[in-house]
Amino acid sequence: MPPNEAELSAHLTRLLDIRLLDPLEILLESDTEVSALRTAVRSRAGEWAHRILAGDDSTALGVIMRLVATLYPDDGPFSPPTDWWRTPLGQALAWRVGHPTATSVSYAVAGAMLGITRQGVHDLVTRGKLTRHPDGGVTPASVRDRLRARDVGPTVPGAVPGRRDGRSHHD
């Protein structure tokens, strides 16, 4: 399941503070000049979280790509560490598009995206619940589809979120 808007907004605010605003404050040697930017980021982070989680796919992808390009600038393809996919932004990205640039992800990355182990991914591939990529790994689209399919909310008391029948996520 994707994070909720409050979780995603708080995560984006922290990321922007750490990666952009704190260094700018150090460079300018003043928090006074940066305080207006901090206020604007807090406000906009809520808007971005809403667009990512509730907007149409095109709008969500546009916001995500702008954030990723700003927060993780690199000349190479986007390839965050495996644990990044467990963050609110990583979970939102996995739920909206899978992986924005890869045609295949490793079982470890697919597991992080799904919140399960590599063995759990292997089991899902074996049972045809995730699509194996011909060159190895798993297709990001199948991970996204799996996340979206289980994002239905529990209807059984004590059920695992995202499952109507209360079974584990990789059943």
Image (cartoon, rainbow, N blue to C red):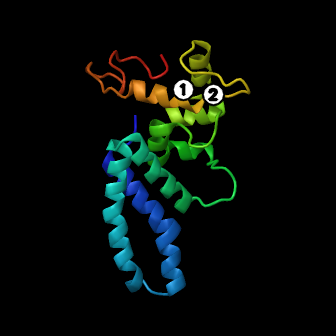
Amino acid type, residue under disc 2 in the picture: Val
Q: Which one is in front, 138 or 84?
A: 138
How many labels sit on residues?
2
Q: In this view, does 169 lie above or below 53?
A: above
Extreme residue toward the right, this view = 135
* Mark 2, residue position: 138
Q: Residue 145 location, x and y as percent?
A: 47, 27
- Residue 91 visible in image: yes
Q: Is residue 17 above or below residue 154?
A: below
Mark 2 surroundings: few (<14), some (14-19) or many (≥20) residues within 10 A: many
Say which quadrant the N terminus sits in.
top left
Q: How far apart in space, not on screen, are marks 2 and 1 (Cα)?
A: 7 Å
Q: Is residue 171 left or right of residue 166?
A: right
Task: Report the residue at 57% width, 44% height from top.
Answer: 83
SS at badge 2: loop
Q: In this view, does 165 lie above or below 95?
A: above
Q: Nearer the viewer, residue 62 or 32?
A: 62
Residue 122 lies in quadrant: top right
Instruction: From the viewer's perspective, tell me whether residue 165 is left or right of residue 98.
Output: left
- Residue that badge 1 annotates: 142
Give the residue displayed 49% in from the left and 66% down from the top: 18
- At horizontal 37% and vertical 72% (from top left) the residue drawn is 38
Residue 36 position, x and y percent, is 34, 78
Identity, as a three-letter code, of the amino acid under mark 1: Ser
Q: Do the residues labelled 2 and 1 touch (CB within 8 Å)?
A: yes
